[in-house]
Amino acid sequence: MERKTFRIQFEWDILDMRSEVREFAKKIGFNELDQSRIVQSVS
């Protein structure tokens, strides 16, 4: 599994990060509810 670091400088960077995290969670098989939980815990 690949590790990724996000640089957050502006508020919209958080939106980009959330989107990438959700896509990754979806890619590895999490359902929509778990994807939301993961995104919330990361942000």
Image (spheres, helix red, strand yellow):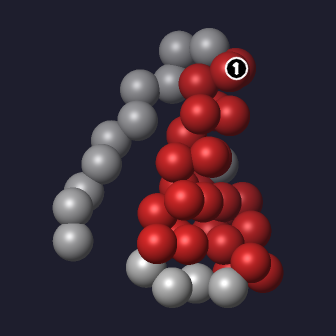
Furthest residue toward front:
27
x and y, in percent, of residue 36 in the image: 74, 68
Which residue has dot 1 on it? 11
7 displayed left or right of 4: right
30 displayed left or right of 7: right
Residue 37 seen from this side: no
Helix, strand or loop under label 1: helix
The structure residue drawn at horizontal position 59% and vertical position 24%, both measured from the top left corner, is 13
x and y, in percent, of residue 30 in the image: 58, 84
Q: Quadrant of residue 16?
A: top right
The structure residue drawn at horizontal position 78% and vertical position 81%, both measured from the top left corner, is 33
Relative height, residue 9 to residue 29 (above, below): above
The structure residue drawn at horizontal position 46% and vertical position 63%, both measured from the top left corner, is 24
x and y, in percent, of residue 29 in the image: 51, 85
11 displayed left or right of 13: right
x and y, in percent, of residue 10 in the image: 62, 14
Which quadrant is home to the N terminus?
A: bottom left
Furthest residue toward top:
10
Total marks placed: 1
Relative height, residue 4 to residue 31 (above, below): above
Residue 40 seen from this side: yes
Q: Amino acid at mark 1?
A: Glu
